[in-house]
Image (tube, rainbow, N blue to C red):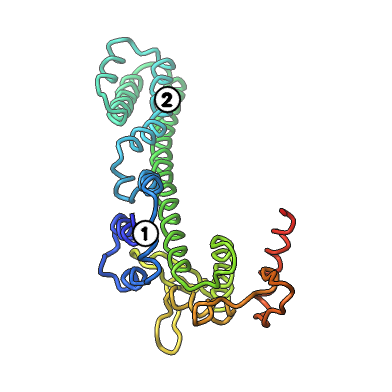
Amino acid sequence: MLITDFIVSLAEKAGIDTKDTELIDLLSKSDLAKVSIADGLTEKVNKSLITKEEAKNSPELKKHFYGNALDPINKKINAFFDEYQLDDATKSEILSDTSTYGQLEKTIRKIAELKEKQSNSGSKGERAELEKKINELASELSKVAKQKEEEKTSAINEITNKYENQLMNYQIDSIIGSKQLPGQFPKDIEMKIAREFVEKKLAEKGAIVKNIEGKLRLVSKDDEKLFIFDAGKEVSYDSLTEMALAENKFLKVSGGTPAPTNGFNRNNGANPPKQNATTNLALSNIDTALEGLE
């Protein structure tokens, strides 16, 4: 599968309009249209990624989180049975409801009935003690139900955020990978260096990247409601990437022949042209690491 087709399928999965201008700009990169992805890799990615709506409606996720959320409530209901030594008929009446929340409601109702029944018998001290226990149990059951509902929601949000972050990183890598990098050493190393330059540029702008309605947008790190502008125009992640790589001379020289770079040029002792100091430092650090592996 061509990587452009794969990006379109991911965009659709993320709810991004295929007519989105930033998406079209990315897909229009000539080099990108020549890259293919193995079917096995696309299958692995598609199996691992789910949308927010799919997460909310997944029977498997619901079964897992509902089970974890409701198990403590079931245990509390059984503890109530034992504590008050309810007869089998009352237990059957409560457990006849297949919903745990229904059982909880019937249990609380039974507590109220027991409270009313006992209020007219026994000493004043006994009634007060019984009323205290019943109120504590009802409060605890309600608290557990609320807590587990919050935990379930938090877990689903955590999974959703995980996949949204993975998709955002994929979009970032796609944009950086579409640039004409020097091509002097392995692509993964160039990608890491390029991303460092972009992160540095983001820091200079006081910006962070957010996925807003399927689009990568730059916002202020101090106020995410404020977008980043330059010369009256909103700065896109794509244009900031181009700017960062150009400033650090980390783009292929026009004409198709990459300029040699310190540390990676072993060209029979020929002197390489001067590079941006930041680029030289990044390349020399990587070169040192590679020499340690030789």
Q: Is residue 199 above or below residue 12?
A: below
In space, the residues marked 2 and 1 are separated at their CA atoms by 53 Å
Asked if residue 181 lies left or right of residue 1, the reply is: right
State which quadrant residue 199 falls in: bottom right
Q: How many marks?
A: 2
Amino acid on which disc 2 is placed: Lys
Q: Residue 267: horizontal and vertical position, in percent?
A: 69, 72
Q: Nearer the viewer, residue 74 or 285?
A: 285
Residue reaching furthest top? 88
Residue drawn at (47%, 66%) of the image:
177
Amino acid on which disc 1 is placed: Ile
Q: Pointer 2 and pointer 1: residues touching (CB < 8 Å)?
A: no
Q: Secondary structure at mark 1?
A: helix
Counting other residues with Cα less than 10 Å from the Cα at mark 1, is it few (<14), some (14-19), or many (20 or more)?
some
Q: Residue 79: horizontal and vertical position, in percent?
A: 43, 20
Q: Nearer the viewer, residue 66 or 233?
A: 233
Q: Residue 213: horizontal and vertical position, in percent?
A: 33, 64
Q: Is residue 177 above or below residue 132?
A: below
Q: Residue 184: horizontal and vertical position, in percent?
A: 59, 69
Asked if residue 40 lies left or right of residue 57, the reply is: right
Counting other residues with Cα less than 10 Å from the Cα at mark 2, is it few (<14), some (14-19), or many (20 or more)?
some
> Which residue is denoted by mark 1 in the rendering?
3
Q: Secondary structure at mark 2?
A: helix
Residue drawn at (35%, 13%) of the image:
86
State which quadrant residue 286 falls in: bottom right
Q: Quadrant of the N terminus?
A: bottom left
> Which residue is denoted by mark 2 in the rendering?
76
Q: Nearer the viewer, residue 170 or 179?
A: 179
Q: Earlier in the sequence, mark 2 or mark 1?
A: 1
Residue drawn at (47%, 63%) of the image:
173
